[in-house]
Image: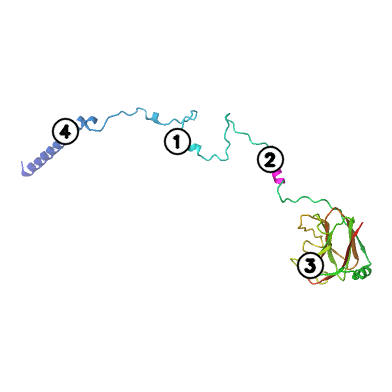
Amino acid sequence: MSLLQAVSVGGCKASLDMTMEKLEATSELQSRLSSLSVSSFSGIASKNCNSNPLDRLQSTDLSRTVVYPDNQTKMDDNSNTKGLQQPTEDGEAPSEPAAGSDTQESNTNEKSSLPGERKALPPLAPASTWTSLSLKELKAKLRQEKDSVVTVYRGDIMTVHVPTVPDAKRVCWEFATDGYDIGFGVYFDWSPVTSRAITVHISESSDDEDEDDELEAGPVVPGDVEKGSKTVANSNLGEILPVYRQDSHLAVQGGSHDFPGEGTYHLKFDNSYSLWRNKTLYYRVYYSA
């Protein structure tokens, strides 16, 4: 046997001996582990598990009544149930009030009796009006009377307050102007009469508009004298004759109205549409039995 062959055989025997030693050590370790039991360790007790783990799951059968714990019931009691109808002892929800029931009627009555509501005013009969060509005669006569000739300035509205009196049945008026027309309207205030004196009130227009120098065409405040001003702020004021522009410079404008009851007439001479021209007004107001 050569030297090389002897070295090779010796290496194989050494490798075989190491493999055998590892196998013997592994076999000895397995024999020791198999001899151990759970009871060999202190503090650990053996317990068999349930053979059917699905039995520990909560039932999801919807046909069965689910009983909740007490703490969950309390949370449900504190939940927001506002606006939901609670069932009665019979298990039925309370019925809603029918339409037109006493509850709805009471609400309607409350709305209709709110304070500050405007009540409907009694109807007013139309005024009787006429014209006359006797301009010179009326102007000459009224120049002799006190406070019968006045100037209604541009943009102004002159209102004559004429209260009703027990000794008369109607109010009458006549008026004329120099050179140009003027707006005129009649209203009736149903407020109780506190004074029998005839008074004159002047108010200024809050929104003047340009006027044509020849035709004097333009809007009036309040309303439109071409279409009839119907803007009334006083809730007790009824309309008899809306404010229209009258050709009082061409003919005498006259009229009358029977008393509808106790109150005060408002005769409005409206020059609010005129931006440049003042109007000379001849007028008289009197009662008739």
Magenta residues? 103-112
In magenta stretch: residue 93: no
Between the C-alphas of marks 2 and 1, the distance is 42 Å
Amino acid on which disc 1 is placed: Asn
In the structure shown, which secondary structural element does the residue marked by tag 3 occupy? strand
In the picture, which quadrant includes the C terminus?
Answer: bottom right
Q: Which mark is residue 156?
A: 3
Task: Give neighbour class at mark 3: few <14, some 14-19, many 20+ (Cα, 10 Å).
Answer: many
The answer to whether the residues at label 1 and label 3 have Cβ atoms under 8 Å apart is no
The answer to whether the residues at label 2 and label 4 have Cβ atoms under 8 Å apart is no
Q: Residue 273's x, y, as percent? A: 79, 67
Q: Residue 119's x, y, as percent? A: 76, 50
Q: Choose the circle earlier in sequence order: 1 or 3.
A: 1
Q: Which mark is residue 28?
A: 4
Task: Give neighbour class at mark 1: few <14, some 14-19, many 20+ (Cα, 10 Å).
Answer: few
Task: Give neighbour class at mark 2: few <14, some 14-19, many 20+ (Cα, 10 Å).
Answer: few
The answer to whether the residues at label 2 and label 1 have Cβ atoms under 8 Å apart is no
**Residue holding disc 1:** 71
Between the C-alphas of marks 3 and 2, the distance is 51 Å
Between the C-alphas of marks 4 and 3, the distance is 129 Å
Q: Nearer the viewer, residue 254 or 285?
A: 285
**Rendering quarter of residue 279:** bottom right
Direction from residue 79 to residue 103 in the image, left or right: right
Q: Which mark is residue 104?
A: 2
Between the C-alphas of marks 1 and 4, the distance is 59 Å
Q: Residue 230's x, y, as percent? A: 79, 58
Amino acid on which disc 2 is placed: Gln
Q: Nearer the viewer, residue 167 or 29?
A: 167
